[in-house]
Amino acid sequence: MSRQPCVAALVGNPNAGKSALFNALTGARQKIANYPGVTVERKAGRMLLPNGEPVELVDLPGSYGLHATTSPDEEVTRRVVMGEQHGQAQPDVLVIVLDSSNLEQHLVFAQEVLELGRPTVVALNMVDLAERDGLVLDSAALSAALGVPVIPTVAVRRRGLDDLAAAVAAARDAVAEQPVARAHVTLPERRMLAHEMAQGAILSETARHRIHARMDKVLLHPWAGPPILFALLFVVFQAVFSWATPFADGIDAAFSAIGDWVRTELPASLARDLLTDGVIAGVGAVVVFLPQILILFFFILTMEATGYMARAAFLMDRLMAGVGLSGRSFIPLLSSFACAVPGIMSTRSITDPKDRLTTILIAPLMTCSARLPVYAVIIAAFIPNRAVLPGVGLQGLVLFTLYVVGIIGAMVVALILRRSVTKGAASGFIMELPKYQLPTVKDLALGLFQRAWVFLRRAGTMIFTVTVALWLLLNFPRAEPGQDQVNASIAGHIANGLAVVVEPIGFNRDIALALIPAMAAREVAVSSLATTYAVGATDDDQQGRQLGDQLKGRWSLATALAFLAWFVFAPQCMSTIAVTRRETNGWKWPGFMLAYLFGLAYVFAGATYWIAVALGLG
């Protein structure tokens, strides 16, 4: 009687090299389809044993666990391994694929598979990359610790494939034996055992590899890691002000000189006023903050390139879990610090629908780069440029505080949402930690150039268009002699109506006017104020004054602080609302987002204003 064809399955964490190993073992003898009932890809092929006997080899989707599954891919892997997947025979042999350079993490899942007591072989894959990074492993010691054969492989170079096929054949012959399930251990115990086994399998390692391991012990420590992260962010915001000041002053002086030259060379006319008060004053008031934006992105790109950003996500997982989210939400929220639009779009990687919706709704509370010009002009105008501690400037401290308030606000809102409209349990989170490496100057320069180009393009298109439109609304109809031009204009009438609503929170007519075009882009608020004060100026000396000087002469400190509080919570640009509508398939959740963000902005701006007035800052 002929024996049934053997079925073997490749299992392991994502990025373990399973697909490369599958391709090397099966070659052209493979087919791809979907599992019945789901849209998860099914890859199966024919592998030959040393005696020429064929084995059906199945490449299962990457998984971090067999029980706490968080995606359709992981659920398919669990069902196939357990023999519960319709249309797929239960594997006779399991081949666990481990990444040699990330052995400790991959051993956690391997132990869960081995607890099933099924015939199993371990492929210690990508040993060449581990050796390149200074790590040499003892496969025999690892085999003794796991209790199953461990075969070193390099799939892309076809190293170890014959030995792996022989091990599968030996495991196939043991199928008829009575399986012996292993004792179940908890996840913390698995992690401890994984660490011990990984350390026991090390034959040699270079100083560089040891340094990287020690860095992770410090940077990922549950108590030391978060303070290091927040200290680094604190340094970033200090640098945004201290490093950028000379460059920003130079750009501001250049735009002022251009405006003065135009006023001198061109005769007085509406065309000259459009050029000086609309284009130069409005666009220049935003472009002046390019150095600060580039410094911020320099640090962000450096943290990404070195591998620290992924570790920051790992550290934030504990905080995210406290508000009902997981570390999966951290990357989209982190992206929102640059712009909420790509941040919201990247939530597609979050498998839990309520997790994803909550992340979308709180993404606008992350302080995007478009808010930086608003913060910078108010802080520079009203917060003294002095040190509060050696090397710690008051202006950078205030900027850091604004970012922290936005983060805290997002976490509180997430907690409330997860206990009400998006109620549900937090999902688990496991991620690969990239290797530490030095960033290349070329990549950093290219990244900064791209960010600068995006910012300048916005200044040359959207901000230019909105500024010119606002200038036209501010200049028509023309005021009678002795009448204030802003009050007489179309924009002035609109602002005076809105001022009634925002006056209780300390805002004046000019702020009310700036809030409307700011919905197109946050930084337009700066150009709107600059254009408004340029149009309302009564002489050339006033027209040439910097925006910060104009604000100090017209606003109280209490109003300035309330204005900052408003922009911490107020909705971002209309593009954010549009992408939210697209990602949620309707206007229900964008409408909810607008309502709660405007509500928070109004309440906190008002509270900030009246507390400041009570403290004598009004």
Image (tube, rainbow, N blue to C red):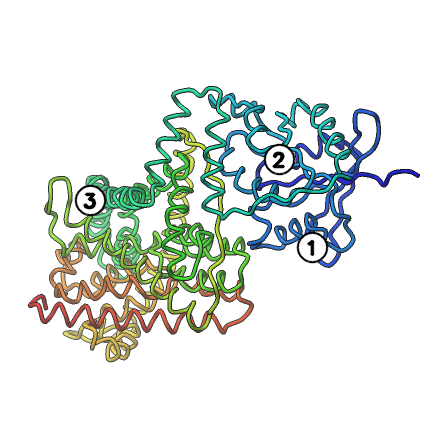
Q: Which mark is residue 39?
A: 1
Q: CA distance from mark 3 to mark 2?
A: 61 Å
Query: Is residue 124 positioned above or below 177 on the image?
Result: above
Q: Nearer the viewer, mark 3 or mark 2?
A: 2
Rendered location of residue 551, percent (x, y): 16, 60
Residue 542's x, y, as percent? Answer: 14, 58
Mark 1 residue type: Thr
In the rendered structure, are the residues bearing label 1 and label 3 in contact, judged by CB atoms less than 8 Å apart?
A: no
Left or right: residue 487 compared with residue 413: left
Which comes before the other along the chain, label 3 or label 2? 2
Disc 1 or 2, which lies upstream in sequence?
1
Circle 2 SS class: strand
Q: Which residue is tagged 2? A: 97
Which of labels 1 and 3 is toward the front?
A: 1
Q: Residue furthest left?
A: 616
Side (left or right) of 336 relative to 263:
right
For this rendering, which residue is in front, 96 or 480? 96
Residue 45: image x %, image y %?
Answer: 77, 38
In the drawing, does residue 569 fall left or right of residue 560? right
Label 1 to label 3: alpha-carbon separation? 59 Å
Q: Label 3 sits on what residue type?
A: Ala
- Residues at marks 3 and 2 touching, judged by CB atoms closer than 8 Å: no
Quadrant hosting residue 46: top right
- Quadrant containing the C terminus is bottom left
Q: Earlier in the sequence, mark 1 or mark 3?
A: 1
Q: Which residue is mark 3?
A: 253
As helix, strand or loop, the secondary structure at mark 1 comes to: loop
Specify whether 333 is left or right of 491: right
